[in-house]
Image: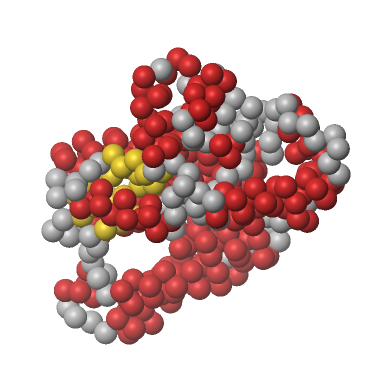
Amino acid sequence: MFLLVKFDLNPWLVLACGVPGSTLGRFVLSLYIPKLSDWLIKRHKREELQFVGKKLGQKTWRSWLFVFIYTLTPLSSTALFTAAGVAKINPAQIIPPFFLGKFVSDAVMMVHETDRIHLLFNNAGIGGGGSFLKDDRAEWDRTFGVCWFGVYYCARAFLPLLVASDEGYIVNTSSVNGFWASLGPGIAHTAYSSAKFAVKGFSEALVTDLRLNAPHVKVAVVMPGHVGTSIVINTNKVLGKSDFLEMPPSDVARVRDQLVKRGIPVDAMNDDEIRTALHQLALSFRDNAPLTAAQAATIILDGVRNDAWRILVGADAHALDRMVRESPDTAYEKSFMEAMQAQGYLQLFD
């Protein structure tokens, strides 16, 4: 990118030469690594790389999808090919998806034709992984990964472009669950809350880091309350689950058990009625929210214009923030939830 801008080269010619060249280099690396790994790589590191490499040797579509997505991220592709070489994976197993991913990622940079940006909005979130003890680990990890690493990797990828500008702003979306890890005393909410706490802590730590090392770049952490989005509906899609109306009997039984534990009478409801109720709840979360997505966006942009580093979105977010600060010891008690609902907030989670 530096040479492209400095010497005003034809971007598509650079792309046509650069991507095959980069692919060829990785191909040669994967051929020689097996012969040199005993000399250059410590035993425990070699075993770790072999483990990763064997993962690449699984079903073709799975390994191709993994390599393609990996190549779109700012992670080092050298490590990927080193792992493949140590595990003696056939280079043909990973070269095609690497070439495609490299071409797409470099083409995006070429189309934008810029070496700097001024605004970066990191907004990623799904639900799921409520219980650390009982829910599926893959679901928990997926939820945490989207909500935290979505922010982290975008910050990593675009920070050099922000620093290259004359002024920049990173806007990271956390949540009220970034300072209150709950949906009420009857609902486990660990993966999402943990990730949003991470986003909040990361953003606050960047305040000082940027002042010291890139004072022309600022950061804001956004903490929305209930905003009308499709996060509840889309979560099932991202996690590979059925739509609420098509939930299998085993999932309905699990939901029924959770509702009973919360003291909600569902004995008279059949499975289809529970499915319909969950579907309506998801629609209500989106359509009957106290704040629309457009209204939330206006609040966020106004906060950025006013150089705010801490942006609460919605009256419920302000109320929660105030109450958690006033009474942190009772924040996870039933009385706290009742006090919030008495003020007209969090009614959907009753």
Where residue 95 appears, as percent x and y from the top left, is 54, 69
**Count the marks: how many?**
0
Look at the image and tell me whether residue 278 can be seen: yes
Asked whether 303 or 190 is in front, the reply is 303
Look at the image and tell me whether residue 89 can be seen: no
Is 216 drawn above or below residue 165 in the view shown?
above
Where residue 308 appears, as percent x and y from the top left, is 23, 43
Is 200 drawn above or below residue 161 in the view shown?
above
Asked whether 176 or 68 is in front, the reply is 176
Asked whether 52 or 236 is in front, the reply is 236
Is 30 drawn above or below residue 227 in the view shown?
below
Res 178 → quadrant: top left
For the C terminus, the image quarter is top right
Res 326 → quadrant: top left
The residue located at (56%, 37%) in the rendering is 347
The residue located at (28%, 50%) in the rendering is 170
Where residue 71 appears, as percent x and y from the top left, is 47, 62
For the N terminus, the image quarter is bottom left
Is 344 drawn above or below residue 38 in the view shown?
above
Q: Is residue 148 left or right of residue 63?
A: left
The residue located at (48%, 16%) in the rendering is 330
The residue located at (64%, 57%) in the rendering is 237
Where residue 232 appears, as percent x and y from the top left, is 59, 50
Q: Is residue 72 left or right of residue 2?
A: right
